[in-house]
Image: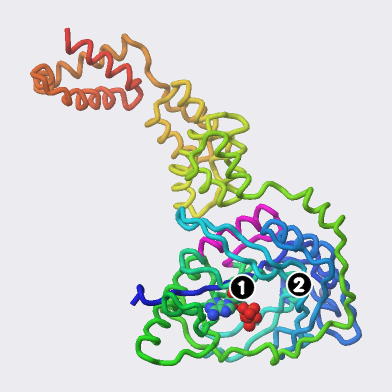
Amino acid sequence: MYDKYQPVIGLEVHVELKTKSKIFCTCPVAFGCEPNTNVCPVCGGLPGSLPVLNKEVVNMAIKLGLAVNCQIAEYTDFYRKNYFYPDLPSNYQITQGDDPICAKGYLEVDTDGVKTKVGITRIHMEEDAGKLVHSGDTISTSQYAMADFNRTGTPLLEIVSEPDIRSAAEARAYLEQLKAIVEYLDISDCKMEEGSLRCDANISVMPKGSDVYGTRVEVKNLNSFKAVQKAIEYEIYRQMCALEDGTPLTQETRTWDDGKGVTLSMRSKESAQDYRYFPDPNLPPVYVSREWVDGIKASLPELPKERKARLIELGLPEYDAKIITSSKAMADYFDACYDKFNEAKAISNWMMGDLSAALNNAGQDFKNSPVTPDMLVELLKFIADDTISGKIAKTVFEEAFQTGKAPGDIVKEKGLVQIKDTGAIGEMVDQVIAANPQSVADFKAGKKQAIGFLVGQVMKLSQGKANPGMVNKLLQEKLSE
Ligand code: ADP
Ligand code: MG
Ligand code: ZN
């Protein structure tokens, strides 16, 4: 079945901007406050109140537009999207119409090494709605709901992609790479669990070779990257089965049930006419001068693509550079280490190996890693100058991660400094030779691999502290005497 059909996917992504105040009033943008404490007549939708556009929202929109190769509009304006829902005090959402702030961009996406270009139709500014908190476990069994308008009027950017995505994995890669760019620009917290990054997926399938897209379904309630990928995979499968059975597909909005791993029908798709869009008479249009855009262009920070190229210049393989630059926190951690220790590959090995694993286990990330860049560098320097072996370093790392102690203190306290004294190692080698006559005989009879066992015994005797190179050399010498 999979070889008969071609999936077609387009994503609509919302990011909540971390401006100080809301998009059209001076209420603070904050997460987790007492309900309804950050509300004023404007975001509360009281008649007679007038919205005033927050310039910082436009700045951030232009930043993102430039980062994803968009054209920045010279003229842009605001529209009202009218609908009734208890989380929307004014009964309309202020959004943009046919002249969004950014359009016609693209993102270069790398899906497991396969590179594609996904078109970005538009990026527009809009306000967020409030939040309904439902009683009970599920929305359908809920007795009542309470409205919290703190979020109302939080600035959002909506990034709409072209239907250029062809697989669930590519959709996930697109979203991850878009998120990285937003993080690098430092314009949003990008937390999918907290809703500051949200994604709706539009999915259809068509017979392979066709150039007519199938009927699309929009899937909502995707709260993690994994959910995005799984929901799309499920929906592709469901639609292919329907086509195979001859069941007609309808254009509808579905919701992802993460527990059951299925999408469920919510409503048939509303058309644009249902929203009675019209220009907001309270907001003047915005004319964006080229000087304004050029000023922002000149101040853009280093983005993932450039950062990756720089790390490759420093000597990292492309694979390492890609992983390290995929999150800003990780890339910043790398730079902080490299500032003090110019061994790019040694740093990336530890970051991608032991450190990533430990952070994962502890449910933490690079931003607040218990092993700071300074501590990792201290450890790497001990390895580089042979103060400790790579194996001991792993133990020191574990302890540093658990306790937050400096690697130097751990090495001192536990007496872990590597033994490089020929006399001391020689004694241990003699002991091991005496205790293992069979292996010694094997070695002398030509079984060269027997030496591995003997090296291991000496290392064990030294509690991992002997310099392995010296152990090997001394053993060779003594065995061929
Ligand atoms: P709406 O505003 O009603 O959601 P849009 O025209 O803005 O509609 O499209 C929304 C998204 O749907 C875009 O990301 C677009 O790429 C995607 N899309 C449009 N047609 C299809 C299709 N046939 N299959 C999959 N995705 C589609
Ligand atoms: Mg839509
Ligand atoms: Zn307000």
Give whichever of discs 2 and 1 has the lower sequence position.
Answer: 1
Labelled disc at residue 395: none
- Viewed as shown, does residue 98 lie left or right of 228? right
Q: Which amino acid does label 2 sit on?
A: Pro
Query: How are the residues colored?
Result: rainbow
Query: Compared with residue 425, is residue 150 higher up or lower down, i.e. above or below?
Result: below
Which sits in the foreground, 462 or 76? 76
- Marks 2 and 1 in Cβ contact (< 8 Å): no
Check disc 2 and report the residue beneath it. 100
Q: State the SS at label 2.
A: loop
Residue 12: in magenta span: no
- From the viewer's perspective, is 209 left or right of 149? left
Q: Please name the amino acid that badge 1 sits on.
A: Glu
Question: Does the closest atom of ligand 1 sit within 8 Å of the Cβ of label 2?
Answer: no
User: Label 2 to label 1, Cα distance in Å?
Assistant: 15 Å
Quarter of the picture containing the C terminus is: top left
Q: Residue 12 carries which label?
A: 1
Q: Position of residue 392 (x, y in %)?
A: 39, 30
Neighbor class of circle 1 (other Cα within 10 Å; few <14, some 14-19, many 20+) is many
Callout 1: SS: strand
Q: What x and y, as percent, mark residue 19?
A: 77, 62
- Kindly indicate the quadrant of the structure image that contains residue 34: bottom right
Figure check: 157 above or below 129: above
The magenta segment is 172-193
From the top left corner, tell me how far across and down residue 290 is, in percent: 85, 58
> Residue at point 80% right, 86% down?
278
Q: Does the residue labelled 1 lie within 8 Å of ligand 2?
A: yes
- Can residue 403 be spotted in the picture? yes
Look at discs 2 and 1 and give the one toward the viewer.
Answer: 2
Q: In which quarter of the image is residue 127?
A: bottom right
Q: Main secondary structure of the magenta part?
A: helix
